[in-house]
Amino acid sequence: MSKMLDEIRQQPEALSKTLKQEWKGIEKLKLQFESYPPRLIVLAARGTSDNAAQFGRYLLEYLTGIPVSLAAPSLYTLYGAKFDLEDALVVGISQSGESTDTNIVLERAKESGAFTLGVTNEADSTLAKLGHATILVRAGKEKSVAATKTYTGQLMAMYMLAYALGANLKLKDLEGLPALAEKALKLEPQVAALAGRYRFMQHAVVVGRGLNYANAFEFALKLMETCYVIAERFSSADLLHGPIAMVDPHFPAFLFAPSGVTWNPISELLDRLDGTTHESLIITDKSNKAAYDSNRRAFRIPAAIPELFTPIPYIIPGQLFAAYLATEKGFNPDQPRSLTKVTQNL
Amino acid sequence: MSKMLDEIRQQPEALSKTLKQEWKGIEKLKLQFESYPPRLIVLAARGTSDNAAQFGRYLLEYLTGIPVSLAAPSLYTLYGAKFDLEDALVVGISQSGESTDTNIVLERAKESGAFTLGVTNEADSTLAKLGHATILVRAGKEKSVAATKTYTGQLMAMYMLAYALGANLKLKDLEGLPALAEKALKLEPQVAALAGRYRFMQHAVVVGRGLNYANAFEFALKLMETCYVIAERFSSADLLHGPIAMVDPHFPAFLFAPSGVTWNPISELLDRLDGTTHESLIITDKSNKAAYDSNRRAFRIPAAIPELFTPIPYIIPGQLFAAYLATEKGFNPDQPRSLTKVTQNL
């Protein structure tokens, strides 16, 4: 079995541990943010962690009303730009904690007066020591080059951060997330059985909206890294603004289809794709009856999940799919070509 | 001749007009921002305009030090999120001024206490009337579905906005931009002659960094819309974080290669690509001697351009290339499949 598959399966435990072992620190952060509420949040990350940051952008803006910006690292690392970051919260996210440019952003932000927070898997890393505070992702060592359990761990950290910033979230809600990840893992036999169908797929487009927009990037990244599938990723809105001209005739589309406010535009896009030579596969759950009970090709998570809590369980079938498809294609998902675990670059 | 090609050639004039006819308004804005400096800038846009917003993010953060965030429109349109936008400047960018979701962002931002600014080509549009202030892109009616002159017009508007926000820019600098666009247009015969080489290109990757990162998205979007080329777009840093595994063996790479701080990482990436079956083409100018005088396949703009002013002239060979390649491939660049000029969606 690949390490990737092994680590995908460790996610419920990793999520539980992260929540339990970090909660005390989160309550402390909450007190601090009550006294000094940030007026702005800046998130800095690269690669998979940048997808977690993308999720954070939506989640934190949605639940806290504080504007969130994704840092453009090159402004710090190459241009040496100076920012006014008084009263800002700057968050660096990195699995290894050794991503050079993420760390530079945090250092500069500190100098500019920001409160800084590191989110990382490695307690002894540069990032963990750099920030005023740290949220440790308690996922255990990640051995596969393709990040899985650290990604969902980072999503968990974003929920915890939202709580610390005063979002209307309860500990009980977050305690339900490992169980939802467990439910998603029940799809493994189904995903394994379907992977063969895509043995010769060379292109794909992954579509997500709102809170699952980041998952579209992450699912696509896994397909690129481990299966060498050319995977485009779009929101349903952006896809209609141009790229659909190219995507329409060739690609299968993978769509995140939770219930809630994003279902309407996703459903309209599905209808539009139906009229083409396209083939779609959706990831959905029991709470979206229209999608769950339809005849569409789907990964159906056997649980009713409020949209707010879909991103962690929803990426899991995507991770499983990438791992099984890599094997079908004869690749080792643990050793993508041209990649190393820690990417240091400016 | 296609309308697209015609409109590409109109850019020097459109840029001149925009600068001249809008400058009085810009000076007025400058006075206002001196009295009420925004603590945060939020940019909202879709499609090509979103690429202009991406440029704005880098330019405005770099030159003004004010943090810039790209709005996630679905938070406004689907989730109905409420933001604290007191003392924020919220900018909507849309060629037609009728992009539903961009307009909703501006409306909501107004309700949340933001100062709002519309950047659009259409004086009578909803967007032009919606904002507290407007910068009109004086490009004349854009008839081709593929946006070209409105994109560079929007980039010009971003420079003008940077000036209004106190950036160390002079009117004289901006007055030089139409002449640089003219120099870039001199490449047309060369671009036309080279387009045939890519007749059967199905994939490409476009790479830009820093101020030209947005151009990578825009060049790729043009290739997708008008040539149906599957065009990935990355910063040199993100490319090394995973996707290079997929990109390495198959794709030609198009890279923006100005002089200045981004040349080092771009140059390193070029060296790395040289060791593969990859083929590269760079867009550069006289100020980057190493690139300009090399034997590399290149579009060489016959002018010495400080990096800060490269984005407008640098996109022009990309636009020309997309227009000529579309013709080589037997497509009509003015009528992409599945697209309409005004995209209204939520």
Image: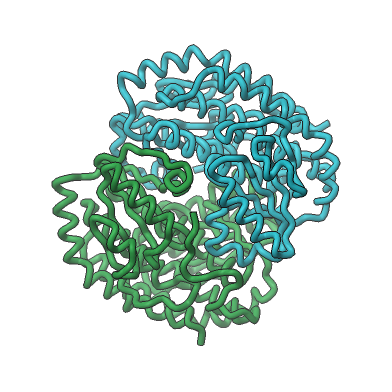
Chain colours: A cyan, B green
Task: Classify residue B193 by image quadrant.
Answer: bottom right
- The residue positioned 29% from the left and 45% from the top of the image is B111
**Rendered view: A239 above or below A345:** below
Task: Classify residue B192 by image quadrant.
Answer: bottom right
Using the rendered image of the protein, determine whether residue A126 is visible from the camera's viewpoint.
no
Left of B199 or right of it: where is B147?
left
**Rendered view: A218 above or below B4:** above
- The residue positioned 34% from the left and 52% from the top of the image is B106
**Rendered view: B2 above or below A136:** below
Q: Nearer the viewer, residue B236 or B293?
A: B236
Left of B170 or right of it: where is A102?
right
Left of B304 or right of it: where is A326?
right
Where in the figure is residue B66, as x and y percent of width and height? 29, 44
Where in the figure is residue A138, as x and y percent of width and height? 61, 20
- The residue positioned 41% from the left and 47% from the top of the image is B71
Q: How many marks?
A: 0
Task: Classify residue A239 by image quadrant.
Answer: bottom right
Q: Quadrant of the N terminus of chain A?
A: top right
Where in the figure is residue B60, as x and y percent of width and height? 32, 51
Using the rendered image of the protein, determine whether residue B196 is visible from the camera's viewpoint.
yes
Left of A23 or right of it: where is A185?
right
Q: Nearer the viewer, residue B309 or A1?
A: A1
**Which residue appears farthest toward the bottom when viewing the image?**
B1
Q: Nearer the viewer, residue A187 or B168?
A: A187
Where in the figure is residue B86, as x and y percent of width and height? 26, 39
Q: Nearer the viewer, residue B346 or B208?
A: B346
- The residue positioned 53% from the left and 23% from the top of the image is A125
